[in-house]
Image (cartoon, helix red, strand yellow):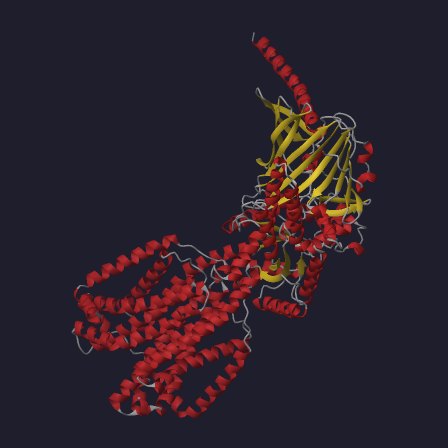
Amino acid sequence: MKDKLFQLAVSKPKIIYWSLIAVTLICAAMMINIKIDTDPENMLPDTQHERVFHNEIKQKFQLHDAIVVGVVSEEESGIYNLGTLNAIAQLSQQIAKIEGVITVDLMSLQTVDNITQQNDAIRFEWMMRQAPESLLEANQIKQNIERLPLFRNTLVSDDYKAAAIYVPIKNKDQSYRIASEIEAHIENIETSNKFYITGLPVAEDTFGFEMFVQMGISAPLAAVMIFILLFVFFRNLKFIAAPMIIAMATVIIVMGMMIGLGFTVHIMSSMIAIFLMPIAVVDSVHIMSEFADHYKKNSDKQRVIKQVVNNLYKPMLFTSLTSAIGFASLMLTPIPPVQIFGAFVAFGILLAFFLTIIFIPAYITSLKETSLESLQAVATKSKRLETWLPLLGRFSFKQSNLLLAAFLLLAIGSVWGIAKIQINDNPTRWFKADHKIRIADKVLNEHFAGTYDAYLVLEKDNSNIIKDFREILTSLNIETQEDNSVSLGTEINEAIFAIEDKLFESDDSSKLELALEKLDQLKSKLATFQQPTNLNLIENLQTALIDTGLVGKTNSLADAVKTVNRELLSGDDKDYLIPNSQSGIAQTLLQYQSSHRPHDLWHLTTQDYSSSVIWLQMKSGDNQDMSKIVEAMNVYLESNPLPAGISAKWAGKTYLNKVWQDEMVYGMLTSLLSAFAVVFIMMAVLFRSIWLGLVAMLPLTITITAIYGLIGWLGKDYDMPIAVLSALTLGLSVDFAIHFVQRTRDLYRETNDINQTFELMFKEPATAISRNAIVIAVGFTPLLIAPLMPYVTVGFFLATIMAVSALVTLVLLPIALKALRSKL
Amino acid sequence: MKKIIFTLLIFLVSTVIAEDKKEVASIVKEAYQACYYPGDDAQRKARMVIVDGQGNKQLRQFNIFKKDKEDGGDQDFLVVFEKPSDVKNTVLLVNKHVASDDDRWLYLPGLDLDKRIAASDKRTSFVGSNYFYEDISGRSLQLDNFVLIGENDNSYKVKATPKDPTLVEFEFYEMLINKNTMLPMRMEYYADGSLYRKAEILEVKTVEGYPTVFKSKITDLRTNGYTLVQFRKPNYNIGLDEKLFTERSLRNPPKNLFK
């Protein structure tokens, strides 16, 4: 197979050219269908039960994605001055008119209701329908907000310096347009206030845009960097063209196929191009160097290229396979974007290998004689490296004891550092610190109770009620179908409605009336969160949440009930209480619904009151903080168990981020360990020696340990990009070891003299390894100027990893191999 | 010649306008009468289904009693809740005044509390439904300017524009008034240039000589939520006691008035 392909390549190079061009063009054409995916939720498979639950809750309680507009006033009175209030009123009215905004759920001082008492009469009125005309009125608004726990520190910050407008939107894809329209309105408002626009949909949209920028700039930049670097090394365009063509073709085919197969481009997969570029170059550089070397001695190009391909086939196959395995191991991590990234980079590496062994022979065959002659002049040796590297070799032998001690210390220090690693991530921090979204996030969280959301969902198990309900219906010979699309409360209401209609026509009514009576009782029973004990339970949970110290504010049905109850009674704080009967609560809630915005209630409870949410506002979106809250609540519920049948579950984006972070850590550990095992077995097979296999694993083991140790010591959070690095390091840095061990063995068998072997090793082979390390490391550096932090992190650490692992290979392997020379 | 035609035209147009003004005022007055003042007093049972945009349904059942002090003038309403049972015997009393603010009272048996409701804007929700208080007790004719914008054999089309637009959430509304019954069969509310709220009368029967609404519906076109109200057992001129409509009777709502 390999020989046939080789024959085809050298005899009919045009076929190879044209098919490569055709495939590349087809794949490039498929890129038109590119779909950018920036939803952090997609870090979890859409079947993941936490995610399914989160979306159910979002639907059930109508929790829309919202753009948050913050207004900050530096005036003494904070936002309670006529200018700022006028700006808020104007802006709210304009936002309400923007297409795609869910007007009825728009929350601002201008759109919410005030509930109060006036001369002993309860009163629902708009908080601020029109901007106030006097400071007295402005002050009245301030006092009103102070008394309403659902708005205080949510609509206006407790320091009065900031107000917020929450703009729920129908479709996240529209958030960029809507945010721009809001910005345009802000421009037109004459005000000295500062405005900030943030919120998850805006962040996601902006992220998508910057991802495009990254792909459009960083990847081509990487190509340019590699091109320049290769030119510096080899100073021959014909020579450089081959690896560049392979790199380009590989990147285009892989990206095109991925997009063509319908995968979305996520933060991870947007990095595929920049990963493949340097890796794809490496093999062809090897072949071209060897060819240039050998061609000087023998000018039969077909024989030379055949010999070169034969020589390099095995080590190239193995390095490609090990790198591919390193990336493919990411598929064991249960995070779809990481899996897709791993799969396509692995595929790309194998594709690059395949292209190298068929395209390079075809390329060389079709080069003109003059071009080939110029190749002979290519400097396959580097003077600088070849003077410097042997020194390194001599040093490592001379100081071997010192080096071993140093590596041992490094290992201990690293393990210590690893123990200190903080697992943490926050998608907002994917933006750089000076990004306007980061600034808005920071400013708003300084003022408000928090812009990060999570929900603690309380649900009652209603299986008994369902059973009774079915029995009642069966007794009346009413056919029922279980309808999961509507809530149980709605089903019961529909049954009541139907029975009443029957009652109207029927003569024998006693049976139907009895059934109606029973159904009405079932409804009361179903209304778990209209019962005083359960509202008290919500209150207690809220206190426990605040006691964690990590929750800025909680909002719940209990708050709404207590507020209305207070205004129904004395209006004083002493009546800020939950009524002590279910009917009292039901009637209080009926009053709540006599406001301008009765539907606000359904963000806190289902309409049958069988389920209720506590809305948490947090200042931090760090997974770590969310984990601590979840942990603290677990401990709390351990000692204060929920009543039988009631469950508490988490939802909300911040919680979902925590879930995928957890999955990431364990997933990456599995990926790393399994890739380690597979690569080790491959090494042992390749070298037919367990010892040599172990030696080959040494550099990457030390590198990974050292890098993660460093992360631990630096206090850098172990986040998504960092987690992905481990498997990559493994796949890439084992390459150096394979080449080093293989060449040492070959030379030792030739010379039978270990000292001479290493003298030779530190010339051409060490140079090749160093060059490859430099090419890959430099190839990743364009990531350092990327606008988004994950790219910067990956770029920085990969460059470091390449450098460290090459150095460890060149310093440590000679010592190990010298000791194990009998195994060579 | 031109001048004569022109003068004639002016004369014609101005007559039409004059007639129009008179006409529209009496049309809306008659409609108001037909809606809110049939009989000297009246009672009926109401069943309300509130359906939100997601298809969730809530039920309310209540009895409505009313007594007019004067046709087109002051009148009293009493709304007594029957269901859900948790709100049973919750009572709302409205002493509607044409010349001043209404007096509204509330009785909550669960809290054993009677409470006055402050006079404020009446476009707040009626117990969580798509009906406003104003839809139940009637929006005063003094608040809007009316223009007759269309007419056919069956109905008048009247456009109403609020005199003070800051007090309401709509820009204007249009009524389709049935010429026979004078009931506004359709009312369409516009805001920001588009239709967003629709009130419809779906079923009318004549009871004791009065065209009586048996089914009506209000839809919020922004959320696609709607509220359907069905009325039963309407009676007119039953001689309801005035004392029924005072704060004192809140705790003892009328029972067994319905046969």
Quadrant assignment for the C terminus of chain A: bottom left
Q: Is residue A154 above or below residue A321?
A: above
User: Residue B155: x, y in percent?
Assistant: 59, 23
Q: Is residue A284 above or below residue A739?
A: above
Q: Would you say B124 lies left or right of A367 here?
A: right
User: Residue B166: x, y in percent?
Assistant: 68, 37
Kindly identify the residue that appears in the image at 27 percent across and 86 percent down. Answer: A747
Quadrant assignment for the N terminus of chain A: bottom left
The residue closer to the viewer here, A773 or A513, is A513
Q: Quarter of the image holding residue A244?
A: bottom left
User: Residue B207: x, y in percent?
Assistant: 67, 26
Q: Would you say A571 lies left or right of A609 here?
A: right
Q: Would you say A441 lies left or right of A703 here?
A: right
Name the residue furthest top. Answer: B1
Name the residue furthest front. Answer: A508
Kindly identify the residue that appears in the image at 80 percent across and 41 percent down. Answer: B252
